[in-house]
Image (cartoon, helix red, strand yellow):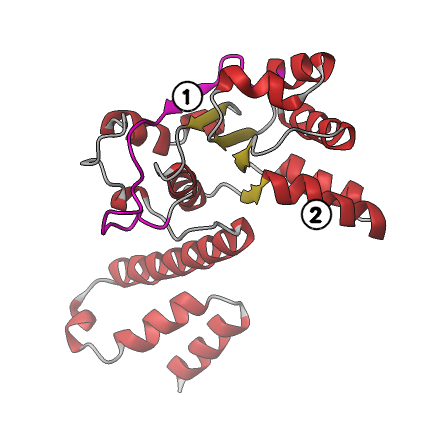
């Protein structure tokens, strides 16, 4: 009877992990030989693991990653200029904690979006908030609709506060005046405050031309490119290979 009351109390306190572990313990006779402190440690470990799993699930849901990618599944055998040590260093997340920028460039099909999502997944596992967006859709649809329904400021604030913002498919088409202004506001809100990851088929040397206005080009690239980490991928498309990275950008 006392155990049932204890279980009810744990659930009432929202210590569901501890409650589950305690309920399981009574079905394992060998655990009765453990000291009180050891059994308590097992209960606390289960509660901590449950909370971590729930937070991770929530972060991944909010991230809206395009691919269910993990660093552990990256294909290092394909010849595309990707070094294992370099990627694992980036997966460690120090650049995110230092609020820096990572630029991933290379031909279509070389795995830019997949790698970006893998690093986003790694960031979520480290407890960072992440948001994946495709630049054409963000600038051409989401911000336009947000202006129309009055949620523009809220959306920009959400993007500004996200620990890691993934801007995928950068530079697919030249920018218009409104798009340039939105992009400048976005990077201005993040520089030195949050981390940003950009993927693009377009070499960085051509980004100024894509932005289309010298003044805005200088302002945006000064905030985004200078001192950024870079991964430049080479080689052919991975879509032909039977690997987890096959359905890439």
Image quadrant in which you'd find residue 172:
top right
**Image height check: is 29 above or below 135?**
below
Labelled disc at residue 164:
none
Specify the principal SS of the magenta part.
Answer: loop
- Identify the residue at horizontal 53%, vertical 29% (top origin): 195
Query: Looking at the picture, how far across and down is residue 53, in whole percent?
Result: 41, 57
Q: Is residue 57 left or right of residue 85?
A: right
Crowdedness near tag 1: few (<14), some (14–19) or many (≥20) residues, C-alpha within 10 Å = some
**Image height check: is 227 above or below 21?**
above
Pick the front one: 51 or 227: 227
Q: Would you say the residues marked 2 and 1 are in contact, meaning their CB atoms lie under 8 Å apart?
A: no
Query: Looking at the picture, how far across and down is residue 10, in whole percent?
Result: 47, 71
> Disc count in the image?
2
Labelled disc at residue 230:
1
- Identify the residue at horizontal 34%, vertical 27% (top origin): 233
The answer for how far apart the CA atoms under marks 2 and 1 are is: 28 Å
Q: Is residue 202 left or right of residue 83?
A: right
Span colored in magenta: 223-247
**Which quarter of the image is occupied by the C terminus?**
top left
Image quadrant in which you'd find residue 217:
top right
Query: Looking at the picture, how far across and down is residue 182, in whole percent?
Result: 73, 32
Q: Is residue 98 left or right of residue 243?
A: right
Labelled disc at residue 142:
2
């Amino acid at each position: 009877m006392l155990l049932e009351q204890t279980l009810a109390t744990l659930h009432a306190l929202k210590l569901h992990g501890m409650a589950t572990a305690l309920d399981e313990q009574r079905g394992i006779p060998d655990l009765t030989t453990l000291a009180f402190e050891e059994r308590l440690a097992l209960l606390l470990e289960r509660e901590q693991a449950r909370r971590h799993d729930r937070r991770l699930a929530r972060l991944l849901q909010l991230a809206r990653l395009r691919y269910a990618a993990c660093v552990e599944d990256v294909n290092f055998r394909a010849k595309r200029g990707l070094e294992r040590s370099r990627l694992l260093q980036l997966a460690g997340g120090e650049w995110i904690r230092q609020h820096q920028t990572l630029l991933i460039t290379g031909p279509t099909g070389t795995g830019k979006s997949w790698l970006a999502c893998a690093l986003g997944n790694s960031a979520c596992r480290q407890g960072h908030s992440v948001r994946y967006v495709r630049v054409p859709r963000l600038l051409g649809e989401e911000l336009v609709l947000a202006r129309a329904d009055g949620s523009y400021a809220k959306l920009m604030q959400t993007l500004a506060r996200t620990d890691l913002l993934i801007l995928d498919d950068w530079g697919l088409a030249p920018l218009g005046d409104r798009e340039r202004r939105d992009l400048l506001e976005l990077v201005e809100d993040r520089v030195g405050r949050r981390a940003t990851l950009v993927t693009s088929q377009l070499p960085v040397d051509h980004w100024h031309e894509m932005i289309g206005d010298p003044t805005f080009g200088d302002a945006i690239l000064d905030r985004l490119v200078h001192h950024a980490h870079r991964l430049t991928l080479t080689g052919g498309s991975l879509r032909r290979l039977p690997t987890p990275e096959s359905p890439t950008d």
